[in-house]
Amino acid sequence: MKRHHQRALWSVVGAALIAVGCGADAGGESPAASGMGTAAVSESTVAPADGDASPAPADPESDTGSGPVVHDVGITVFAASDLDPTVAEAIGATLDVAREAWGLRWPLEYWVFGIDPDAAVTLIEEFCTLRDSYRQWDMDQCFAREANDQEPHTLLSYQQLGAEALAMGQPMGSAGLNGSPEWTMHRFASSAPWGLMEEFGLPGDEDLKTVFHEFWHAVQSQHLDADLPRDTRDERMGPVWFVEGSAEYMGQYQRARARADGLLPDVPDGDYPYRFVEQMRWKLDLVDQELAGGCAGRRLMTLVRYDDPCSFLGYEMGAWAIAYLESIAGQGVLLTEFHPNVQELGWQKTFERTAGMTLEEFEDAFHDFIAGPTDARMAVLPDVGGA
Ligand SMILES: [Zn+2]
């Protein structure tokens, strides 16, 4: 519960420049190795940074002595009043699709910020009132922390990022799972989702993919015991390439699958089509470019930390590593084999059992694969009906 990480990853699709990244806050997670599961995930353009973004545990002296209230499992989207209601509706509908596909074990809150500062403060008041009512975090402490315009990685910073992006004419954004396993819940925050707001010509499906990506971090988190010590939780979450690569691949795949199946809401098209195959192809081009350039010589298993200058490869090469894993171990293998066992067996043993080989063997096989011809690489992707 001490750190919050954000990292940057620029994804250029068509003519649009989109910020895609992930940061980790950790309601009990170490940013280094765990990242998102317990940590925050940010689609962001800011440089890696640390900060204390998590609340202190509820003070047992400050109330009746009971611990935090564990509330009913469900999904709630809280959106700033300057956002059109269709934004929260689209996010809520997408979260429901993700729950249907992947399951939800803990209550889930998704807090969406717009660009108006007053609306953001009102939303933070609502957030802190809720924390206080659940005996998780004192109202005043919560508000002093989350509405502070001088501190990084607060809830207010999501509004500030959106306002800054709009002022600069750059479609920056950030979304994250900010905790909190210690409260046996998932809480997300998001800056202005430009595609859903019909800004910058971005497709709304880019934002829906982000929702799936974030939800996968909840999947990772809820398969571990809520009360695991932080170090143990970090180990079981796995390295950055796995935590982020799997969230990104599963997010991409499930968005496409759900779109093809007609499960997702209608959202703005934006200026270019958002399709699984093209997104994965773009990642492949970036991997090729970076392995021949700034991140030459880097191997998959070295991408373990968010503060690594090549950690963005953990998202894109990691997504391809999961695509490759599924091609050899079976589609959906993370949900059916990996996550049900990781709490008991630990990350490495579970991964090796899932892949049917050692980590070293997997890494060698993957690098042989990723060095191969593009047609052969693209051929391992599942058919998503052109979505
Ligand atoms: Zn992520």
Image (cartoon, rainbow, N blue to C red):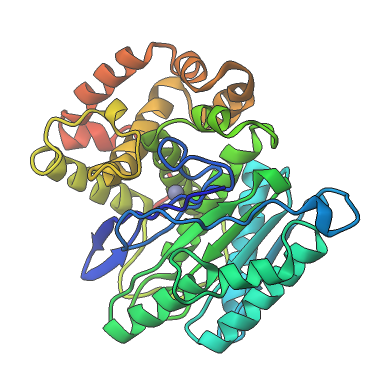
Q: What residue do we see at 18% from left, 46% from top?
A: 285
Q: Is residue 251 left or right of residue 169?
A: right
Pinpoint residue 190: horizontal percent, then vertical percent. 51, 66
In the image, residue 13 above or below residue 339: below
Q: Is residue 73 left or right of residue 355?
A: right
Kindly give the residue lying farthest to the right in the view shown. 64
Pinpoint residue 41: horizontal percent, then vertical percent. 47, 53
In the image, residue 145 above or below residue 97: below
Number of dots carrying numbers: 0
Quarter-wise, where is residue 360 in the image?
top left
Kindly give the residue lying farthest to the front in the view shown. 61
Q: What residue do we see at 44% from left, 12% from top?
A: 356
Frontmost residue, 205 versus 119: 119
Kindly give the residue lying farthest to the left in the view shown. 293
Pinpoint residue 136: horizontal percent, then vertical percent. 75, 56
Residue 71 visible in the snapshot: no
Q: Is residue 261 left or right of residue 57?
A: left
Picture quarter with the C terminus: bottom left
Q: Is residue 237 left or right of residue 248?
A: right
Residue 236 visible in the snapshot: yes
Frontmost residue, 307 versus 176: 307
Pinpoint residue 256: horizontal percent, then vertical percent. 46, 52
Q: What residue do we see at 31% from left, 52% from top?
A: 279
